[in-house]
Amino acid sequence: LAKTTQPISMDSYEGQEVNITCSHNNIATNDYITWYQQFPSQGPRFIIQGYKTKVTNEVASLFIPADRKSSTLSLPRVSLSDTAVYYCLLRDDKIIFGKGTRLHILP
Amino acid sequence: ETGVTQTPRHLVMGMTNKKSLKCEQHLGHNAMYWYKQSAKKPLELMFVYNFKEQTENNSVPSRFSPECPNSSHLFLHLHTLQPEDSALYLCASSTGTSGFDEQYFGPGTRLTVT
């Protein structure tokens, strides 16, 4: 069973900021929080990873509160090409992908 | 291009056939993975290899037989498959298998078992 819980789907509009929250109440001390993006008929692609506080790269930001029981992926100014499935996963000794969040960007 | 290639991209096989999927990574990584992705189901990790040694087998049926001759190549040998084995098979690689090692995925092989 996946150790994370995410919304099944989300809709947003071009140019908006999108925040996808992932719950991981049983996160372990050694777990890193990792987000992947998957387009149809392609393999997942790493987006961002963090352990605590805030991480930012050229694609997204990841916000992790002090208790680490949740995390939020923030995509600034989304475009139609950001329509994909986004997976939040924890990694300790096993890699478990959940069902992900199907993000649909509307024009 | 992620640096991980998979062949073939599409495969149709009968239940009595024997076929193999091939994965090659050009990233200098030490760990390689096979995943299965069925329609409307989460990605399932099948096998993990680290420095050519199998380190994980997640209760995969014996009709799937992996082979890792070196750190750059990974095969999945298929025999006597069932229709429910039809899925997208993804290969990935990473520097190591620790919690902070980013995985790079190939484009996948779309397998249909008839």
Image (tube, rainbow, N blue to C red):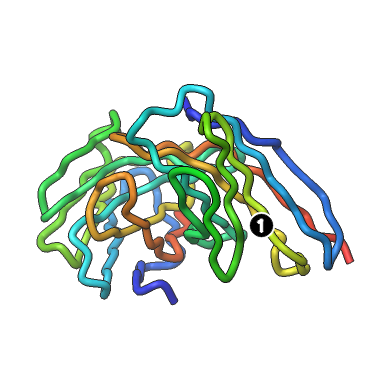
Relative horizontal placement of residue B85, taking residue A85 as reference (left or right): left
**Is A33 placed above or below B70 here?**
above
Instruction: Please name the amino acid that badge 1 sits on.
Output: Ala
Query: Regarding mark 1 in the picture, which secondary structure is present there?
Result: strand
Relative horizontal placement of residue A29, taking residue B32 as reference (left or right): right
Q: Dividing the picture into quarters, in which one does residue A57 lie?
A: bottom right
The residue identified by callout 1 is: A84
Regarding residue B86, the answer to whether it shows in the image is no
**Is B71 placed above or below A10 here?**
below
Task: Looking at the picture, tell me which residue is in the foreground, B51 or A88.
Answer: A88
Task: Looking at the picture, tell me which residue is in the foreground, B47 or B82.
Answer: B47
Give the chain letter at badge 1: A
Residue A72 image position (x, y, % from top left)? 63, 44
Residue A43 image position (x, y, % from top left)? 48, 59
Regarding residue A28, the answer to whether it shows in the image is yes
In the rendered image, the quadrant that contains the N terminus of chain B is bottom left
Q: Residue furthest right?
A: A107
Figure disc tally = 1
**Is A59 placed above or below A88 here?**
below
Relative horizontal placement of residue A89, taking residue B104 as reference (left or right): right
Residue at 33 percent across and 50 percent down: it is B100
Residue B106 image position (x, y, % from top left)? 40, 64
Q: Dividing the picture into quarters, in which one does residue A6 lie?
A: top right
Residue at 10 percent across and 60 percent down: it is B69
Residue B71 image position (x, y, % from top left)? 15, 63
Relative horizontal placement of residue B22, taking residue B83 as reference (left or right): left
Q: Dividing the picture into quarters, in which one does residue A90 lie?
A: top left
Task: Looking at the picture, tell me which residue is in the foreground, B100 or B19.
Answer: B100
Residue at 77 percent across and 66 percent down: it is A77
Disc 1 packing (10 Å; few <14; some 14–19; many ≥20):
some
**Is A39 placed above or below B55 here?**
below
Residue at 46 percent across and 49 percent down: it is A50
